[in-house]
């Protein structure tokens, strides 16, 4: 019995050795890409063809862009022409004028229409057209006239829909409002350090905002910075006093203007009114003499 077990063990060991020998390293002879001494075929023809195709496409795009610019220049007037030359999209432009302001061709945009309203968005989102203000993400038209322009800013999307929004002060106000909203979100999440940072940056663009001063003072107070919080609270009260003085001055100015206009109209109406008719005085009544 012991000899049988020993024989089985030897047979199993021999089989294992045979299997190990069959599973040894192998050398794979891969087919060579190029043999030593061979030369690759010339690629000049392919390069020249690609260059010619690119030149043709570039020439077509340049021609389309020049055509759009010529059409925009022929149909613009006054401030619209100045905006096209400066490269700024302004309200009231036509689609061709908006393309000319961004120095692009129709191939750079996708136009979606719905009745009198239409929207022009970049065809490639990663390579949006730009004007002198910033990166344009959407242009909205009403009766083929620009009524809103959306720009991609650091704090999000800024929409220009009125003449006041196109000025430097309007842009600063929009950026400050975006920073205030972002600060409110951080404050709601409990991140007071980032909220204070956003409020400080917004305060640099909106100096005369009393409530923003109060928010900064509150953040400093919660962060146990009493001296800075005291200064901010004082500035908040001063801002309120200044706003009250300005409001009272504006109200007095409007009242004085109304009084002056009323007096002016009274003078005009008195001059235009016809003179009252004067009735002739009655003749004295004569009584006949009485003889006794």
Image: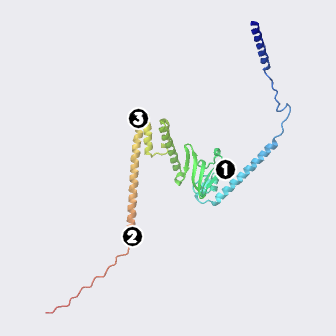
Closer to the camera in the image, 242 or 115: 115
Question: Reading the chain from its start, which is encountered first: label 1 or label 3?
Answer: 1
Disc 2 target residue? 269
Disc 3 target residue? 226
Closer to the camera in the image, 202 or 161: 161
Disc 1 target residue? 108
Residue 71 locus on image (x, y percent): 66, 58
What quarter of the picture does the C terminus occupy? bottom left
Q: Which mark is residue 209?
A: none
* Marks 1/2: CA–CA distance: 63 Å
The crowding category of the residue bearing disc 2, from other C-alpha atoms within 10 Å (few below 14, some 14 to 19, many at least 20), is few
Left/right of residue 196 with respect to residue 281 in the rendered view? right
Label 1 vs label 3, nearer the camera? 1
At x 40%, y 46%, the residue is 240
At x 66%, y 50%, the residue is 108
- As helix, strand or loop, the secondary structure at mark 3 comes to helix
Question: Reading the chain from its start, which is encountered first: label 2 or label 3?
Answer: 3
Q: Is residue 236 above or below residue 30?
A: below
* Marks 1/3: CA–CA distance: 55 Å
């Amino acid at each position: 019995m012991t000899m049988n077990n020993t024989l089985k063990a030897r047979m199993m060991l021999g089989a294992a050795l045979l299997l190990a020998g069959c599973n040894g390293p192998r050398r794979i002879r891969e087919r060579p890409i190029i043999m030593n001494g061979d030369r690759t075929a010339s690629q000049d023809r392919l390069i020249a063809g690609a260059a010619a195709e690119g030149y043709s496409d570039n020439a077509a795009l340049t021609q389309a862009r020049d055509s759009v610019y010529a059409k925009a220049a022929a149909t613009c007037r006054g401030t619209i022409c100045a905006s096209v030359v400066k490269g700024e999209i302004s309200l009231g432009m036509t689609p061709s004028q908006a393309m000319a302001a961004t120095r692009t061709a129709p191939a750079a945009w996708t136009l979606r229409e719905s009745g009198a309203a239409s929207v022009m968005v970049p065809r490639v989102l990663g390579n949006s057209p730009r004007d002198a203000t910033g990166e344009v993400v959407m242009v909205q038209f009403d009766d083929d006239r620009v009524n809103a322009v959306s720009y991609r800013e650091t704090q999000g999307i800024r929409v220009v829909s009125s003449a006041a929004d196109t000025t430097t002060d309007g842009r600063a106000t929009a950026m400050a409002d975006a920073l205030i909203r972002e600060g409110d979100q951080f404050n709601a999440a409990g991140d007071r350090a980032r909220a204070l940072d956003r409020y400080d940056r917004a305060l640099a663009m909106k100096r005369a905002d009393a409530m923003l001063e109060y928010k900064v003072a509150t953040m400093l107070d919660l962060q146990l910075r009493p001296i800075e919080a005291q200064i901010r609270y004082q500035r908040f009260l001063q801002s309120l006093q200044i706003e009250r003085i300005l409001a009272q001055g504006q109200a007095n100015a409007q009242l004085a203007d109304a009084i002056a206009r009323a007096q002016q109209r009274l003078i005009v109406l008195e001059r235009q009114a016809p003179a009252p008719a004067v009735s002739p005085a009655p003749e004295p009544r004569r009584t006949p003499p009485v003889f006794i």
